[in-house]
C-alpha cells in the first residue's frame, strides 16, 4: 500500500537520468508536485511535460551543473522566485571515473568530490531552510553498496559514497526531534543506460545477480523513507553479501575487490573507460 502525504513538493536532482526518471514518475503517481533539476536542459522539458500529461501534478524544472557553486546559487534564486517550499528531497546526483587513481586528472577528482559530496550537502542544507512549515521533511540520499568498502579502481568514488552513508545517518539523528526523516539508498548496479549495462556485464555473474530493476528500487526507496528506515540496500543478494562481508577483515575485503575490479578493468575496451553506473545517461555529471 502506498503512503500518501499531504500536498507535497519534491525536489529531485539528476532528474533526467534513469533513476531520476523512475523517482519522478513514482512521486508523480502519488500526486506529489515536483521540482526537477539536471545538467541536461534538453531532457528536463520533455520529462516535465510527460509527467504532467500522465498525472494531475505540477512540475517545475531548472537546469544546473551542481558541480559549480554559481550554478547552485542561480538554481536557488529561481526556486525563491517561484516561492517554493519542500517536504521531500531526493539527492541522486553523483558520478565516478573508473580506473586507477594515478590515471585520474585533478579536474576529475575535483568533479567527483564536488558532485558526490559538496553538492548533496548544500542541496540538503538549502532545503532545510525552505521546508514546508509544520510538516515532516523527508530526505533520501543516494549512496551505493560501494560505500561500505574501500574499493581499489574506485578509491575516491567509494570513499565519497561512504561519506554519504555516514553523513546521512548522523543527520538523521540531528533532525529527528524536528520532524526530519533521513534515509540512505545503497544500490549495487542499476541498468540506467547503455554504459551502465556494459559496466554490469563486465562484472560477470556477480554483476548480473546484484542488478535490480530501477522502478522497483524507486518505489521501495520511497516507501522506506516514509517509514523512517535508515538504510535501504535493494536486493536479498546484496543485503546478504553486505552482512557476510562484515565478518571479513577489511584488508581481505580490499584485496578481493582489487582482484575482481582489476580483472573487469582489463576486460574493458578502454582501460580507463568512464563508466556510467552512477550517472544519468551519457553525461558524466549526473547520477543514475
Image: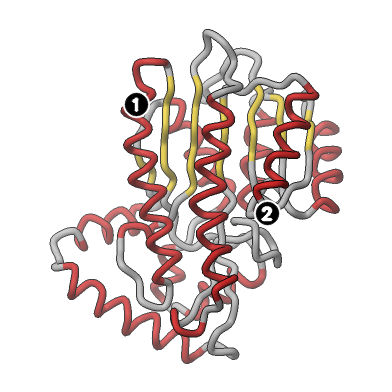
- Rendering coords of residue 228 (x, y %): 38, 27
Q: Which residue is depicted at the point 79% across and 23% down?
A: 82
Q: How is the image coloured?
A: secondary structure
Quarter of image, res 183: top left
Numbered disc 1: secondary structure: helix
Residue 272: give its label. none
Residue annotated with mark 2: 17
Mark found first going from the N terminus, 2 or 1:
2
Q: Which residue lies at the image location 39% right of the left edge and 52% below the top edge?
A: 235
- Report whether 163 appears left or right of 88: left
- In this rendering, the answer to whether 180 lies above or below 172 is above
Residue at image point 42% right, 58% down: 160
**Above-or-below relation of 262 to 115:** below
Give the numbered dot on residue 174.
1
Q: Which residue is nearer to you in this view: 85 or 26?
A: 85
Q: Secondary structure at mark 2?
A: loop
Rendered location of residue 93, percent (x, y): 59, 51
- Residue 222: x %, y % from top left: 51, 34
Discs 2, 1 touching: Cβ within 8 Å: no
Label 2: few (<14), some or many (≥20) within 10 Å?
many
Amino acid at each position: 500500500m502506498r503512503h500518501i502525504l499531504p500536498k507535497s513538493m519534491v525536489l529531485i536532482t539528476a532528474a533526467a537520468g534513469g533513476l531520476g526518471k523512475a523517482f519522478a514518475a513514482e512521486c508523480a503517481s502519488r500526486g506529489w508536485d515536483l521540482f526537477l533539476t539536471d545538467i541536461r536542459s534538453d531532457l528536463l522539458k520533455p520529462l516535465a511535460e510527460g509527467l504532467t500529461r500522465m498525472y494531475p501534478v505540477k512540475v517545475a524544472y531548472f537546469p544546473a551543473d551542481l558541480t559549480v557553486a554559481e550554478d547552485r546559487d542561480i538554481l536557488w534564486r529561481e526556486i525563491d522566485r517561484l516561492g517554493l517550499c519542500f517536504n521531500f528531497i531526493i539527492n541522486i546526483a553523483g558520478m565516478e571515473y573508473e580506473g586507477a587513481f594515478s590515471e585520474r586528472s585533478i579536474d576529475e577528482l575535483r568533479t567527483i568530490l564536488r558532485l558526490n559530496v559538496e553538492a548533496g550537502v548544500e542541496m540538503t542544507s538549502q532545503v532545510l531552510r525552505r521546508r514546508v512549515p509544520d510538516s515532516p521533511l523527508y530526505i533520501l540520499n543516494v549512496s551505493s553498496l560501494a560505500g561500505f568498502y574501500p574499493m581499489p579502481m574506485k578509491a575516491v568514488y567509494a570513499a565519497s559514497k561512504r561519506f554519504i552513508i555516514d553523513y546521512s545517518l548522523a543527520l538523521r539523528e540531528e533532525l529527528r526531534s524536528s520532524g526530519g526523516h533521513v534515509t540512505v539508498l545503497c544500490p549495487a548496479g542499476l541498468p540506467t543506460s547503455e554504459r551502465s549495462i556494459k559496466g554490469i556485464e563486465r562484472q560477470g555473474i556477480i554483476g548480473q545477480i546484484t542488478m535490480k530493476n530501477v522502478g522497483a528500487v524507486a518505489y521501495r526507496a520511497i516507501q522506506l523513507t516514509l517509514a523512517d528506515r535508515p538504510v535501504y540496500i535493494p536486493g536479498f543478494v546484496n543485503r546478504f553479501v553486505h552482512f557476510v562481508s562484515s565478518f571479513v577483515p577489511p584488508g581481505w575485503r580490499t584485496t578481493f575487490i582489487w582482484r575482481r575490479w582489476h580483472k573487469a578493468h582489463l576486460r574493458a575496451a578502454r582501460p580507463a573507460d568512464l563508466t556510467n553506473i552512477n550517472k544519468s545517461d551519457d553525461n558524466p555529471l549526473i547520477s543514475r
